[in-house]
Each structure stands twice: as C-alpha cells, then as structure tokens.
C-alpha cells in the first residue's frame, strides 16, 4: 500500500484482515505519514515507489493520496503554486508518474478515491482531485476504488457516524480526516472482497497445487 497516513491505516488493517481471512497473500504496509504527491522535495513518492516495487515485485498495489496535497507541487520539473491555473496539470503529472511505475512493472494498481473530509477546505480539495484520479487511473488501465459510497451517508457528505448494515458505526475520528479502526477495517475488507472476486489465486480454497503443496503466495504489497 502506498500513500499517506490514511493509507497507513488502510494498510495496517489489510495486513490484519488478510491474515484473519486466511488469504494466501503476503501483505506489505509501507505507509508514511505527512507525505503525498505534492512535495517531492520532502518525499518523492514516484521514485520511492519505483524502488519499493523493484525490491518487492508486488502483484497488486493499493494507493491512497490527497489528504496532504493541498499545497504547491514541488517536483523535479519545477514548482507550481497551489491555486494557480497550472496546478491541476502539475498534480495530474504526479498521478501519472505513479501509474507509469505500476504499468511498466505489470502491477495491478487499485487507487482509493479519498472520502469526504470534516475540514471544509480539505473536503473541497479532495472533491476536486477525485475526478482527476479516476480519469487518470482509467486511462492507465488501473482501478479507481471510491470509498465514499460505503463510508459516508447516501448524500456523500462527511459524517463521523455512518449507518452500515442497519447499525450506526463510528467511521471517522475527531480530527475529521482519519478513520476509526472499524472504518479502516471496513475499507480493507471491501478491497479484499474486490481482489478475491477478481483473482482466483487469492481464494483460500484454491491455494493448493495438485500435489497438495502450497502454491506461490500472492504478493499484495500495500506500499504506503
């Protein structure tokens, strides 16, 4: 799993839930707080991701970015002030770098679309970049994975408590951005549901060769 502190939370629960469900997956959580795609001078995610991918050789990567990106883009190509007319292009370029790393290594990439935020300004920012993520992911053959439909009320607005399966569930923490353990677990389970539906080799019942010996484990690298 790659990405910010939210990605780190999703990653920790992906590790736990994959083990609890008995999935034949090796899950690696590389989350890093205070990082994003805007500030390559602080943490160059495209370069770091490339190095991680070459080291771990993952089959699938899950990504989440955006919560720390409401600022100017500082990249090897130059600086682009936040709010300028060129900011969208500069940020999309950073998104494409991540997608390119995955495509060049035949990695299946699931990109989590950020959910609504309790901070009005950050919420507007995330609502703005979500369509860009979806568009760029689709063009690159990656999977855009929106979480708003099941982590927010039907109107898609931010709420700390959400009705899940007929029960009120504490979804977000008091800071208005991060998820509760239950919220992280819900997202992790939905991701694992999508992956087990797509990949037969992730289903425990198929995790054996004809000779009864375990097959190669699936490398789900949650490189955050």
Image (tube, helix red, strand yellow):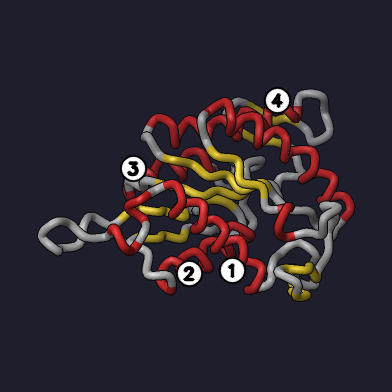
Please give the residue where the numbered disc 2 appears in the rendered image. 17
Q: Badge 4 is on which residue?
A: 89
Residue 156 position in % (x across, y down): 82, 52
Name the element at disc 3.
Answer: helix
- The residue that label 1 is drawn on is 185
**Which of pointers 1 and 3 lies earlier in the amino acid sequence?**
3
Q: Position of residue 110 (x, y in %)?
A: 53, 45
Q: Residue at x 60, y 33 (%)?
A: 94
Which dot, 4 or 1, sits closer to the camera? 1
Disc 3 or 4, which lies upstream in sequence?
3
Q: Nearer the viewer, residue 113 or 224?
A: 113
Residues tagged 4 and 2 counted as in contact (Cβ below 8 A): no
Distance CA(mark 4)–CA(mark 2): 37 Å
Q: Furthest residue to the right? A: 120
Q: Residue 221: x and y, percent? A: 41, 53
Observer-nearest of 185 and 92: 185
Mark 3 to mark 2 CA distance (whole Å): 25 Å
Label 1 sits on a secondary structure element that is helix
Q: Position of residue 73 (x, y in %)?
A: 69, 36
The one nearer the camera, 207 or 32, is 207
* Mark 4 neighbour density, 10 Å: few (under 14) some (14–19) many (20 or more): few
Quarter-of-image position of residue 76: top right
Mark 4 or mark 2, which has the lower sequence index?
2
Q: Earlier in the sequence, mark 4 or mark 1?
A: 4
| C-alpha separation, residue under disc 1 versus residue under disc 3 | 28 Å
Task: Please tell me whether residue 195 is drawn above or below residue 101 in the rendered image.
Answer: below
Residue at (36% x, 47% y) in the render: 58
> Residue 54's mark?
3
Image-quadrant location for residue 91: top right
Specify few, some or many for label 2: CA neighbours under 10 Å numbering under 14, 14-19, or 20 or more: some
Q: Upstream in the sequence, badge 3 or badge 2?
A: 2
């Amino acid at each position: 799993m790659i990405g910010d502190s939210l990605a780190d939370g999703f990653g920790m629960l992906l590790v736990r839930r994959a083990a609890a469900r008995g999935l034949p997956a090796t899950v690696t959580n590389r989350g890093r707080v205070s990082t994003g795609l805007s500030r390559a001078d602080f943490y160059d995610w495209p370069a770091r991701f490339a190095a991680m991918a070459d080291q771990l050789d993952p089959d699938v990567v899950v990504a989440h970015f955006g919560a720390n990106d409401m600022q100017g883009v500082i990249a090897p190509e130059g600086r682009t002030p936040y709010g300028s007319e060129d900011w969208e292009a500069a940020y999309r370029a950073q998104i494409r770098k991540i997608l390119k790393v995955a495509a060049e290594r035949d990695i299946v990439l699931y990109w989590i679309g950020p959910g609504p935020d309790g901070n009005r300004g950050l919420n507007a920012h995330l609502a703005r970049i979500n369509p860009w993520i979806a568009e760029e992911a689709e063009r690159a053959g990656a999977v855009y994975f929106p979480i708003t439909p099941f982590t927010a009320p039907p109107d898609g607005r931010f709420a700390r408590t959400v009705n899940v399966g007929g029960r009120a569930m504490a979804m977000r923490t008091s800071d208005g951005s991060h998820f509760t353990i239950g919220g992280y677990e819900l997202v992790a389970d939905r991701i694992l549901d999508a992956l087990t539906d797509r990949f037969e080799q992730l289903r425990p019942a198929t995790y054996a060769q004809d000779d009864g010996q375990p097959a190669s484990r699936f490398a789900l690298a949650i490189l955050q």
